[in-house]
Image: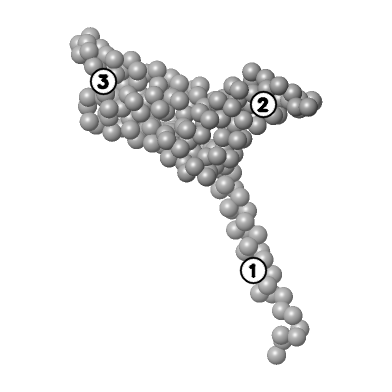
Amino acid sequence: MAGRPRQGDFLAGGAAAATLLMLVFLLGVTPWAAIPLAISTYVALVLLPKRRTRHDETIDAVRRQHLAYQAAVAKTAAIRVLVPRIGKPAVREQVGNILNRTIRVLVVMREDRNLAALPLFDQKLLEPFHSLLIEYVRLSDRGIRSADGLLEKIETRDLPMVEQAVDAFYEQLHRPHLVDLATLGEVLEFNLESIATTTPRRFTP
């Protein structure tokens, strides 16, 4: 007889459903691609903990990564709401670019099933950027003259630094792929040289 569902099962089901909605409607992932990702979220939050043994630390890390992913997606949604409230067109465009690049980072990490660096990305970059943007929009909306210097610093220094950091993180994500590509190229070159220098006798004129 199957056991009764636990509260954690319902919470995980809700988290999986929220992940599905965020992937489809916020990040533009197709439903067929988003459904397996939502299922993997459910597995990470419920099924794996039921089989906890000596791999507890690994399982906990997986759960933290999935929770960090959900938190990061929620922050990108919140930033998307703030963008239209930015008065200066150039600043609005720059924040929009940062948002698009952040979404690209999240999509790539999910596609590659590599969320190990996501807690770092969420806590050290995305969270402080979101908080900074909230205060920037609030003060610029209210026209606080004493904040002009701080607002200008954010526009001319902080936002470019955030943009560069997101781009650098995106490049870092692809370093393993670059190594793999270089290795595969070397293997292919070696194989082609072997074919060129080793001709079967029956093909010898």
Q: Quadrant of residue 157?
A: top left
Give percent across and percent down for residue 26.
42, 34
Q: Which residue is mark 2?
A: 46
Q: Indicate the quadrant containing the N terminus: top left, top right, bottom left or bottom right.
A: top right
Q: Amino acid at mark 2?
A: Val
Is 76 above or below relative to 109? above
Taking the image as shown, residue 185 lies to the left or right of residue 147, namely right
Question: Farthest residue in the top direction?
Answer: 146
Residue furthest to the bottom: 205
Q: Crowding near pointer 1: few (<14 within 10 Å), some, many (20+)? A: few
Write down the residue under mark 1.
Answer: 192
Quarter occupied by residue 68: top right
Q: Which residue is mark 3?
A: 152
Task: Kindly identify the amino acid type of the residue bearing the numbered disc 3.
Answer: Glu
**Is there any visible trace of residue 17 in the rendered image?**
yes
Earlier in the chain: of badge 3 and badge 2, it is 2
